[in-house]
Image (cartoon, rainbow, N blue to C red):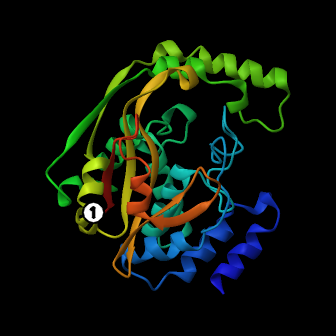
Amino acid sequence: MLKFFILLVLSQSLAFAGSREEAQDILLRFKNETSITKRLDLISKIFMGLPYGQGGPLGEGPEGRYDQDPLYRFDTFDCTTYVETIMALALARDINEFEEHLDKIRYENGEIDYLKRNHFTDLQWIPFNIENGHMTEINTTVTNQIKVAEALINFPNWIRSIKIAEIKMPNSTQEEKQERLEELHALAPNYTSSIARVNYLEINMLVKKPQLLNKIPTGSIVNFVRPNWDLTDLIGTHQNISHQGFIFKRNNVVYLRHASTTGKVKEEPFLDYLKKFVNHPTMKGIHLMRLN
């Protein structure tokens, strides 16, 4: 019944997507479930099959300076917005708590601003969500064989590399968008480059010792690590993280549930997914976290 309701809502106008009423309905339907892990599992399931949101489906809302996509929505996700939305829903008991958690998860100090958004998982999203108490790193629950990825995040160059297609102002002319883009580019000198480091477990090792996957707690958040991944031509910098999702266990099988770039929110055996990246030139490992 819940899935039918969600699909019915999602078939309506996109203007309704992300409304407070819709969020409150989801929260009310799970109000009696107290386990965070169970809430993550149940809530994340209702969005299975929804389309992958190309180009980043969320922004700072209608008052956003550079990206006026909604602050939250329930009709489409990319990998990060899927994880963030489910986390915030799982932690919240009412709509105000949901919005507060989501802001703190997505933005530095919960301040809704394009350049305060946690654009870089390695440099911002992981450390800020550890600092604010939302998350804990749990790699060592699986093994002590930890490696470290390191990349110089060229934040100024990333700002200068932002393109006009990334300026989401639906009611503005192309000229107005261009002016706003130039304004954003002019802010680049106010920022500095920083080293981002991420601990990770090697994919090759995990595939050789698949029994280690059983040690991953159900409900964990997994970040996929590409050490010093060179995206200079695309976004002006290197980085370490390319994808995110959830780990759940069912019938002694470990599953990855994620908004997949193949086109939709889906679930697949985690070992099968990892096998695709054995000896991969850039994808080397996983980083694990727990929602507190």
Q: Quadrant of residue 134?
A: bottom left
- Look at the picture and state if 174 lies above or below 289: above
Q: Quadrant of residue 159?
A: top right
The crowd level at tag 1 (other Cα within 10 Å; few <14, some 14-19, many 20+) is some
Taking the image as drawn, is residue 133 in sight? no
Question: Residue 137 location, x and y as percent?
Answer: 26, 52
Which residue is depicted at the point 46% across and 86% down?
A: 32
Q: The N terminus lies in which quarter of the figure? A: bottom right
- Mark 1 lies on a secondary structure that is helix
Q: Identify the residue at the far left of this view.
A: 144
The residue at the point 67 percent across, 45 percent down is 54
Tag 1 residue? 210
Relative to residue 266, is residue 161 depicted above or below? above
Q: Position of residue 31 (x, y in %)?
A: 49, 82
Is residue 233 in view? yes
x, y percentage for residue 111?
Answer: 49, 41
Residue occupying image coordinates x 68% and y 58%? 51
Q: Name the foreground residue: 288 vs 193.
A: 288
Q: Is residue 136 left or right of residue 274?
A: left
